[in-house]
Image (tube, helix red, strand yellow):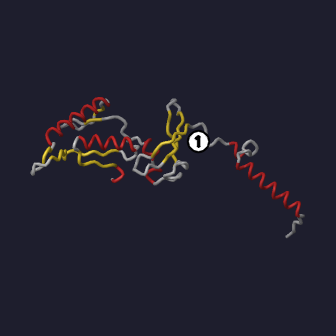
Amino acid sequence: MSQINLTRRQFFKVAGSGVGVTSMTAMGLAQAIDPVFAKPYKLEKTVETRSTCPYCSVSCGVLMYSRKDSNGKMKLIHVEGDPDNPVNKGTLCPKGAGILEMVESPNRLQFPEVREPGSKEWKRISWDEALNRIAKHMKADRDKNFVAKNAEGVTVNRWNTFGMLVSSASNNEAGYLSHKVLRSLGVVALDTQARI
């Protein structure tokens, strides 16, 4: 095995050159020179959107990348944790890592549907019709089952036959308003999907 004899000055020149090349590569300056870097990046020409994971109340930050498909419609192609989010610092749990599969699932329900009593088929309805139907059912149930006073005559204002599952990924203000509106109606069973 042959020995390489370097003077101290030659050693510093070689080491300095190595540090310089490594630094240039880290800064991206090698892309124009090295054909390995000439390939397009996976997320090149995508639109980055910051969002919050919809699954629980931890509120992990996610980065969602989308680009136009062959039909010109924006399509989500990649989801990852947001490294700038102070909650998760770029990490995601298994549910959060599966957001892309949830969004792109062919079984995902995207429009309101109703199955009339006695029917075996679901039919698509408009959002206005869905919200009006929900409001009518809520009013009818509350009128029938609202408890103003208990057996001892104490005012309780309870609506025990209705429950609401609200979003745990909402901000504080939306959560506060949801809570106040539902409690003012007498709703007792109120929870978020974070506990399910």
Q: Which residue is mark 1?
A: 43
Is 137 left or right of 26, judged from the image as shown? left
What residue sits 24% from the left and 36% below the top?
A: 115
What residue sits 73% from the left and 49% below the top?
A: 25
Task: Give percent across and percent down for residue 45.
Answer: 60, 36
Q: In this view, which residue lies farthest toward the bottom?
A: 1
Task: Give percent across and percent down for residue 192.
Answer: 33, 49
Helix or strand or loop: what does disc 1 sit on?
A: loop
Is 34 left or right of 94, judged from the image as shown? right
Q: Amino acid at mark 1?
A: Leu
Number of marks drawn? 1
Question: How would you rate the neighbour count of disc 1 (Cα within 10 Å): few for under 14, some for 14-19, many for 20 or more?
Answer: few
What residue sits 45% from the left and 50% below the top?
A: 96
Nearest to the observer: residue 66 or residue 168: 168
Task: Give percent across and percent down for residue 157.
Answer: 18, 44
Task: Give percent across and percent down for residue 106.
Answer: 40, 40
Is the residue 139 above or below the residue 87 in the image?
Answer: above
Q: In this view, which residue lies farthest toward the front?
A: 154
| Quadrant for the N terminus in the image | bottom right
What residue sits 15% from the left and 38% below the top?
A: 143
